[in-house]
């Protein structure tokens, strides 16, 4: 097979258990030490504790291993290029060395300022009654213009969108306003805690003098410092694309297109400076040709997220589609990865198989009725991801058999 099948696990408090992931057919776990504050060193002891937790039942059941770190987060001071970034970069290097010493060799990160992924609806009902994540540009404008009331926000929206947002806001209940606010400010995958509106504007203000070029320079500086260390210790770094792949809230986003990735790869031309190829994030943009991007960047792709989004009649809006539906030509994408895997095997590369996880499954079946501690994080329900993985596993096998 081309892929090492994995799933994301958010640690001991994740309602989706390691046994659930094992029974889905996965061999690898994608996780992180979320309890450690951003910027602090991940100690060998903390890493080993997580490994022991993951491998605790390996003597009785199908083995699981910690295959990918997602994510070793980049401190905001690095993204802003502040003098304090020097210490945070040194801490990052130490964490990479500690991970390598524990046998973990794939590390995902992102460089999105302030917010991670952004959505406006976490419970969008699909035609089959399952629930998906959705992003609606007009609703995002409601948050920006009417709830946050960001200075000069009007410049980011057409007059038509501004007027529509204000009309919609005027009809919203307090509960609807609170739901939209909490959804936009959710912040990080695997979290049910949103940013506070009172402090959020201050976080944005920290970037008011940082535009597209400045953020790119700060990203390139960071990778030029850490990728050579990663290369030396045998760790593959892989950046996650922006989600959605466009500027939001006046913040630049610089990992959205093929050109963005090409510039980043050239900024530090070592194999350890690599890519998390997220078909969902990149696929939101119609101008990203995903199979050709796999062909172009194949050797620098160290981790894969397979999911697909569906652009709506207003192409600024999208929702998470079923894994083999939507706008991503999953057949051609997986075929491109099968060819890349064959190339690696022919060259006898140690990392011929690429870790892959099915991303953002629909909430469905029994997961629709779970509440409290049993309720999974948005996009990370067990059954929806199991369905996606099963479909992707069958597609991969069919393509490989057809090539044999």
Image (cartoon, rainbow, N blue to C red):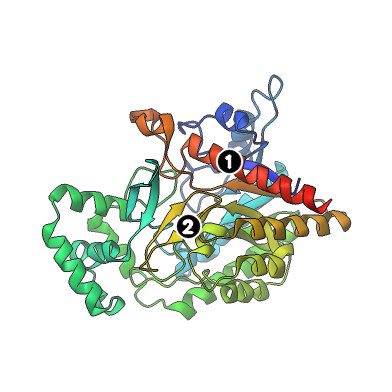
Residue 203 at what x, y percent from top left?
33, 63
Q: Residues within 10 Å of mark 1 (few under 14, many from 20)?
A: many
Q: Could you say which is closer to the camera, residue 190 or residue 169?
A: 169
**For residue 234, side relative to residue 375 (left or right):** right
- Image position of 373 with respect to 312: above or below: above
- Image position of 343 with respect to 378: above or below: below
- Image position of 249 with respect to 52: above or below: below
Residue 224 at what x, y percent from top left?
64, 70
**Which residue: 52% across, 75% down?**
216
**For residue 140, side relative to residue 358 (left or right):** left
Residue 2 at what x, y percent from top left?
74, 49
- Image position of 113 with respect to 324: above or below: below
Mark 2 → mark 1, Cα distance in angstroms: 19 Å
Element type at marker 2?
A: strand
- Residue at which label 2 appears: 309
Q: Could you say which is closer to the camera, residue 308 or residue 302?
A: 308
**Which residue: 71% across, 67% down?**
295
- Disc on the earlier residue, 2 or 1: 1
Residue 105 at what x, y percent from top left?
70, 49
Q: Residues within 10 Å of mark 2 (few under 14, many from 20)?
A: many
Eye-nearest disc, 2 or 1? 2
Q: Could you say which is closer to the camera, residue 399 or residue 346?
A: 399
**Which residue: 13% across, 50% down?**
174
**Quadrant including the N terminus:** top right
Q: How many circles with numbers are drawn on the protein?
A: 2
Is residue 111 in sight in this rendering? no
- Residue at which label 1 appears: 7
For the residues bearing labels 2 and 1, Cβ distance under 8 angstroms = no
């Amino acid at each position: 097979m081309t892929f090492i099948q994995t799933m994301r696990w958010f640690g001991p408090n994740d309602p989706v258990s390691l046994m659930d992931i094992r029974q889905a057919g996965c061999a690898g776990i994608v996780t992180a030490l979320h309890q450690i504050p951003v910027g602090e060193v991940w100690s060998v002891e903390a890493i080993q504790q997580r490994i022991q937790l993951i491998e605790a039942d390996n003597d009785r059941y199908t083995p699981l291993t910690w295959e990918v770190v997602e994510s070793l987060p980049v401190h905001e001071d690095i993204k802003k290029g502040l003098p304090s970034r020097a210490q945070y970069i040194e801490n990052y290097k130490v964490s990479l060395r500690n991970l390598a010493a524990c046998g973990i060799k794939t590390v995902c990160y992102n460089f999105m300022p302030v917010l991670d992924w952004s959505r406006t609806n976490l419970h969008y009902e699909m035609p089959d009654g399952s629930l998906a994540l959705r992003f609606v540009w007009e609703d995002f404008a409601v948050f920006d213009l009417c709830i946050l009331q960001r200075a000069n926000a009007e410049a980011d929206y057409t007059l038509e969108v501004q007027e529509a947002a204000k009309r919609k806001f005027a009809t919203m209940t307090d509960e609807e306003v609170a739901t939209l606010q909490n959804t936009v400010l959710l912040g990080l995958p695997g979290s049910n805690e949103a940013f506070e509106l009172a402090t959020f504007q201050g976080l944005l203000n920290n970037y008011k003098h940082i535009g597209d070029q400045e953020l790119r320079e700060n990203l390139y500086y960071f990778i030029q410092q850490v990728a050579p260390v990663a290369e030396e210790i045998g760790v593959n770094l892989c950046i996650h694309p922006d989600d959605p792949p466009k500027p939001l809230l006046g913040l630049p986003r610089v990992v959205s297109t093929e050109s963005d990735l090409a510039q980043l790869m050239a900024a530090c031309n070592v194999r350890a400076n690599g890519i998390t190829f997220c078909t969902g994030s990149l696929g939101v943009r119609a101008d990203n040709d995903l199979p050709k991007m796999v062909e172009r960047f194949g050797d620098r792709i160290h981790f894969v997220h397979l999911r697909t989004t569906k652009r709506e009649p207003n192409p600024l809006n999208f929702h998470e589609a079923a894994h083999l539906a939507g706008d991503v030509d999953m057949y051609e994408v997986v075929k491109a990865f099968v060819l890349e895997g064959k190339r690696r095997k022919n060259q006898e590369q140690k990392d011929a198989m690429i870790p892959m996880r099915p991303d953002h499954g629909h909430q469905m079946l029994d997961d629709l009725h779970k509440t409290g501690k049993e309720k999974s994080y948005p996009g990370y329900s067990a059954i929806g991801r199991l369905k996606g993985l099963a479909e992707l596993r069958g597609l991969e096998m069919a393509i490989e058999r057809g090539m044999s």
